[in-house]
Amino acid sequence: MKLRDDIERYLAGKLYPFWFDRVAAPGGGFTTYFDRAGKPTGQTDRTLIQQARSIFMLAHAIRNGYGAGRAPGLLADGLDWFLSRFRDADHEGWHWIVDRDGKPVGTDKIIYGQSFVIYAMSECALATGDPRARAAAERTFELVQTYAADTRHGGYREMFLRDWQPRPDGAFGGDRKSFDVHMHLMEAFTTLYELSGREIHRRKLLEVIDVLWSRMFHRGTWTGIAQFALDFTPLPAIMFRTVWGSDRDNEGAPRPLDNTSYGHNIEFLWLFLHALEVLGQSVDPYRERLGRLAAHTLKHGVDPVHGGIFVEGPHDGPARDLQKEFWQQAESLVGLLDAYLLLGDRWYWNAFSAAWDFVREHLVHPVLGEWHALAGRDGTIVWDYLGHAWKNNYHTTRSMVQVLKRLRKVEERGLAG
Amino acid sequence: MKLRDDIERYLAGKLYPFWFDRVAAPGGGFTTYFDRAGKPTGQTDRTLIQQARSIFMLAHAIRNGYGAGRAPGLLADGLDWFLSRFRDADHEGWHWIVDRDGKPVGTDKIIYGQSFVIYAMSECALATGDPRARAAAERTFELVQTYAADTRHGGYREMFLRDWQPRPDGAFGGDRKSFDVHMHLMEAFTTLYELSGREIHRRKLLEVIDVLWSRMFHRGTWTGIAQFALDFTPLPAIMFRTVWGSDRDNEGAPRPLDNTSYGHNIEFLWLFLHALEVLGQSVDPYRERLGRLAAHTLKHGVDPVHGGIFVEGPHDGPARDLQKEFWQQAESLVGLLDAYLLLGDRWYWNAFSAAWDFVREHLVHPVLGEWHALAGRDGTIVWDYLGHAWKNNYHTTRSMVQVLKRLRKVEERGLAG
């Protein structure tokens, strides 16, 4: 398949090398601060998300046969730096931001970040067998259970101070739950269970899946609701006072209550199917609702004119924000292919194909390979940088690896591609 | 007050000495197997409940000014034996039963037992400052959070295999929750928080209190419901296939769904008031429901003819089982006094007084001081032994210590006593 060959060549020849050439920060750790030309922006802090996602990126490359001669060394050095600089010696868990020398400058315990540590350390242990990575993944899992689990309502609290006391309510996030964080915990527990095979990791994965399906979806359309009170009452999504980097999803004014993110929905679809695969469970009980989720994405999220998917809109009605975020495109490529493989409806293939064309034509830097952060509906670049604290290497590289796996399945099954 | 002097003399002169003379088992650890004459029954296994409750009994004595010259030595020896024999070196947590040599013979992880370890180790650390006891309490708390918390529905699962996998469903208890265990977790977290002052211990105490009040009481009467599915659907209480010793509460045929335990209700009342005191929270928001709970006990649970409290009955109607269990009497003495102090209704004093008369005349061994296990309604002894795996020293000694504290309050406030 020509498309598969093209993407294979692009991933191995451009996208991974972009990061292999740049991700090792001078002085240690990983950096992802790069402007539209791939030059360092001069920002030198190290965020937990940067480190964890870069570790994931390298480990994921190794597990999937990329980066020979480069990724293992980068991973080993970055892991050493991370383990010695980010661990909170007083309260365990992981700092949120440290400076270039490894001095903590942001010490809140943000479960979004702790979750990526579990995910990255598990992927690293699967790639390299490093016992320190496995121990870090398992201990972080325990800390999340001990400090973040909500034994009153189920699910997890998400934002804590350094000593694991919940942050204040409201904009500090201490009294909110989100689809986003629970989805990423599902993602992290999936890979942890893949690594360990332990019943407790399986059980907590099953439990967070149940919380997501029973509490965090809009019934009928099976689209995700962004934010909740601790008791899972849906709330209009607000911006949290946390240094997140530049991801738009947590910036701006409160969202309407009737709002769903196309990128999160379709990302959930494929992460959930992957979780079922690792669990060895059938998709059948979920087929109908996954069909509705995918149909909603297709009907309201996919741009029928320019290709790609929009940012967000109501649970039942046309999209409200028609811009194109890099991460939503990356996750939709995988999710639309999974929808095609699951449901067999050719429209998902067409949507995937048009999204990839949009990405290739507008988001991908033609020489450097990494994607610009944000485009308008027609592909005009809005935020042009290639890397930032949050906008880094995990969505784009993982998307390409996962797309290739699914394109092979499309071929194997003799489906029209 | 003559009554207070009598109980003080009885506790210091008979009840505590009964245990100080006997509780150290030949070869190490604690034993509570004593027949109607206070002679060893010959049974030599050591149960987790026996060890934890004996450690609590000694530590509680020390904290309240009893056992000088005896309790500290007994506690130190027993603690050493316990920590070296009961800890599961492979999976952490604590064995359920070991033999006289310390070899594990029952290794399921029963949260009821783990909870008593938290309680006893916390009380021990408060009494002696022993850092091993505090570390054991804090680590056991973490294990309970990691392995037993139900992150889908809230609350805790209660019965596990040695490696913390849930036991099978039904009679093995893997898919049930109970008022009993959640109440004892409240009791344990209260003393752990009293010890540590840590936010996480306070938070989990508040959460389990919320689970109890929001999920585990019959509305209107505010009486406890015994058993639930994992999602808190009330279920007819069944006997679990666990070696519990001889406590009747977990033996026999399934109970009717419309059933509540007078002893658990009134025990909850005083343990909850104690939790509020340790938390520094006002009782006002709970006063009305506590009044209803106490009124139900008075109306249906208290025997107006012979004194003492019955075993159980429906949530609204006359008692069904009119026997008198030792532990229900012990807990009701404290709870009825607390109801008197809280609500000011003289009937609670009268009920306390009649219950104490019943206990003194029928249950207390006139020479040895410890209580027989079970009597008929009129005081005829049914189960005559003074100690067993579960029928041991925690309920009786703690009851007397707590009754004395409350009698002092009755005097201080100039209430009729």
Image (spheres, coloured by chain):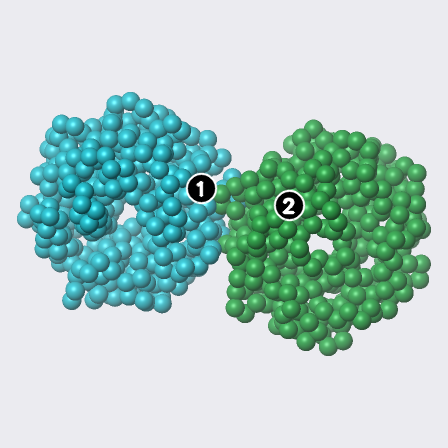
Chain colours: A cyan, B green
Left or right relative to A286: residue A352:
left
> Toward which corner of the image does residue A117 lie, by quadrant?
bottom left
Q: Residue at x 65, y 57 (%)?
A: B113
Quarter occupied by the C terminus of chain B: top right
Q: Amino acid at mark 2?
A: Ser
The residue at the point 41 percent across, 43 percent down is A209
Residue closer to the observer: B212 or B99: B99
Asked if residue B15 shows in the view, the reply is no
Position of residue B368 measured from the top left corner of the image (x, y, whole percent): 90, 63
- In front of the other: A177 or B193: A177
Whole-percent x, y for residue A286 in the image: 38, 38
Q: Residues within 10 Å of mark 2 (few under 14, many from 20)?
A: many
Q: Relative to residue B215, is residue B197 depicted above or below?
A: below
Name the subunit of mark 2. B
Write down the quadrant of residue B162 in the picture.
bottom right
User: What residue is disc 1 on?
Assistant: A210
Image position of B41 with respect to B148: above or below: below
Q: Position of residue A112 (x, y in %)?
A: 36, 46
SS under mark 2: strand
Q: Are marks 2 and 1 in contact (CB under 8 Å)?
A: no
Chain where mark 1 sits: A
Q: Residue at (13%, 27%) from the top-left corner? A: A305
Q: Residue furthest front?
A: A414
Do the residues at discs 2 and 1 belong to one chain? no
Label 2, label 1: how many angstroms apart (C-alpha)? Answer: 22 Å
Q: Which residue is more in the foreground, A292 or A209?
A: A292
Mark 1, Cα crowd under 10 Å, few <14 / some 14-19 / many 20+, is: some
What residue sits right under mark 2 in the picture? B178
Question: Which amino acid, mark 1?
Answer: Asp
Does residue A305 appear to the left or right of A337 in the view shown? left
Residue furthest left as drawn: A367
Q: Secondary structure at mark 1?
A: helix
